[in-house]
Image (cartoon, grey):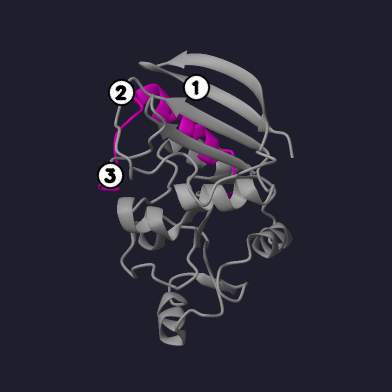
Amino acid sequence: MIINAAMSADGKISTVERVQTRISGRKDRDRVDALKAGSDAIMVGIGTVLADNPSLTVKSKKRREDRKRAEKDEYPMRIVVDSSARTPIDAEILNKGSGKRIIAVSKRAIIADVDRLSEKAEIIVCGREEVDLKNLLDLLWQRGVKRLMVEGGATLNWSLVSQGLVDEIYIYIGNMIIGGEHAPTLVDGTGFVTDMAKLELLSVEKMDKGIILQWRVRN
């Protein structure tokens, strides 16, 4: 599993208003599109869906055609981690482009909301109060998901990192300061006090007006 994210020089992934913020440039967006095309599935948390309404589609026609030639779906599977089944029925992730969609919910989700979303996506119920991510990953593996890309947000990133489920992290660091005590960072959550997650730096590359860092998580 890889996490991919863009953040400001001070570590913020968006403003305090938690709306989509353009941090990277054209070359990095193309890099991200290639990562998507090379993945079996792309996963986000419900916070990202509500704030950014992403489609998570592969933009390059050539990359989509390459996937089809490899006998894959045109678009990778798209997954929302949504414990309470709050995903809007008109969300881009459910309506733009072809391919499989999964919404992972917990047992506390309201049945009517789950039924509504089941018209657009496969529903996986795992976990009592929150989605059990380890169980979810096992179920995704059984569905053929070997390479999973995660596009955030900060709460989902924390859950995955803190449970030792992440293999690599790609971070684009842009040439800006966003600031804000309550603006989301790459990883939020409760945070480590001891036994922090350790990283091994694999590569550094200048791109657009910032840099790309590739880390291996030393689980």
Image quadrant assignment for residue 91: bottom left
Give the residue at mark 1: 212
Classify residue 136 as left or right of residue 177.
Answer: right
Callout 1 secondary element: strand
Q: Amino acid at mark 2?
A: Met
N-terminal label among 2 and 1: 2
Segment colored magenta: 16-43
Q: Is residue 26 magenta?
A: yes
As for residue 13 lying within the magenta part, the answer is no
Q: Residue lying farthest top?
A: 206
69 or 151: nearer the viewer: 151
Question: Which residue is painted at 40% across and 22% down in the image?
Answer: 27
Residue 33 shown left or right of residue 161 in the figure: left
Disc 1 vs disc 3: Cβ atoms closer than 8 Å? no
Residue 155 to residue 126: above or below: above
Q: Nearer the viewer, mark 3 or mark 2?
A: 3
For the C terminus, give its image quadrant: top right
Q: Nearer the viewer, residue 96 or 52?
A: 52
